[in-house]
Image (spheres, grey):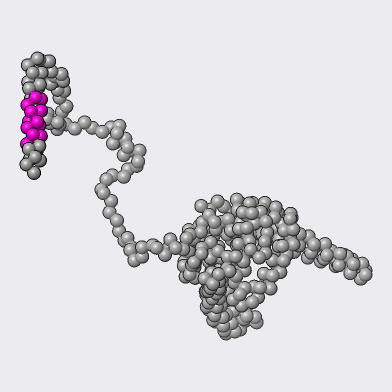
Amino acid sequence: MNRGFKYYFGNGMRTAAKVLYSGGGYLKYLLYYFASAIGRLIPFFGAIFWVSDIRRAKIAKREGTLTVTRAFGGVDGGNKFGATVLSVTLVILIALGGAAALCALAYGFWLFGYLLGASAAMTRPEILAAVFALPCLAGAVLFALGVGIMFAPVPYIVDSNKKVSATAVMVAATETMRRSGKFAYFLSVFVPVLVKAAYLAAAYGVLYAIVQLVSSPVLLLILCAVWILIALAVFAAFAPLFTLAGDIAVTELFEDISLDPSALENRTKGVFVLKAHGCGAEMNGLDGDLNRLFDSAPEPQDRKEDVRYVPPTDYEPKMGVFRENDVAENEGSAESAESAEGVEITEQDRNGQVE
């Protein structure tokens, strides 16, 4: 169940502050950050950092600590490594393919607009060309963004399942995001980027003001150097907090909404319900139906006499009257039974003697 961006990001901020600024967590974060920054540049191999980010966030949430080596535990097997590389590669190719098609369409519209402007003797026909091409370029950006959102659970699904195929991972990811979580995921990624971008913009604004206000070259150089050092130190102190908080928020979101790829593979396929008919009962509201069934049900008028309950009048006596003749008869029958048994025993003895 999706519990909303505020819940996930709030938990992410609290967990990130706890693990970053205690027990050497900040140094571990920097070590992992620079290793991932270099590793993501390596073709194919850089895909494992998509999964290691999720594993690191899981460990931070459950154990309250940051780790470097254990973060790669989700892709240390051949099956997981292959599924990760193939699924990430396919996602990138889908995003690039759609964006390239829309960019080609934008170029066609740009040429059409340019020729139209030139035929109309415009002084700047490229302006009209840009107007024609801009919607397609915006569509390309939105398509790439949509692909990134729809396949966002891929690293979590790879890390959370032992044996999965790339196709099953991608199907489970799209089915997950189709149901819910798109907006919460977008905010969990966008808000940290927005906060860091706003801080950098503000820092640049202060630097620009210093350049405009200070006329002495020596003083200007000193003030700019000091401000750049201060701004970078503050950025290095708080930026990891928001980055890690976003990773933890995304991980918690996927823990709540992610679908199991094995369950999706076991679905019944090829059955489509086109039309369904009800039983014909009136559906005028639940309250009215319950009233009609229990409170205001009419008495049947054609009840027959033979179905009515009639109390019994001829009770059979449960205890009989004791009589002495019955006892004598019972004793006589018992003696005859014993004598019969004796005869059988005697015959058996005789047979044994004869043998």
Q: Is residue 300 above or below residue 83?
A: above
Whether residue 111 sits left or right of residue 32 in the image: it is left
Q: Is residue 206 above or below residue 287?
A: below
Relative image position of residue 278 (x, y in whole percent) = 28, 51
Dominant secondary-structure state across the stretch colored magenta: helix
Q: Is residue 123 above or below residue 21?
A: below
Whether residue 220 sits left or right of residue 314 in the image: it is right
Task: Looking at the picture, tell me which residue is in the foreground, 293 or 119.
Answer: 293
Relative image position of residue 201 (x, y in whole percent) = 74, 64
Residue drawn 30% across the image and 58% down it: 275
Whether residue 259 sits left or right of residue 14 in the image: it is left
317 in the magenta segment: no
Residue drawn 58% across the image and 69% down it: 76
Relative image position of residue 28 (x, y in whole percent) = 72, 62
Residue drawn 28% across the image and 36% down it: 293
Residue drawn 35% across the image and 38% down it: 287
**Residue 47, image quadrant:** bottom right
Q: Is residue 302 above or below residue 136?
A: above
Task: Looking at the picture, tell me which residue is in the foreground, 229 or 195.
Answer: 229
Name the quarter where the C terminus is drawn: top left
Q: Which residues are magenta?
A: 334-348
**Residue 34, image quadrant:** bottom right
Q: In this rendering, does residue 190 appear at all? A: no
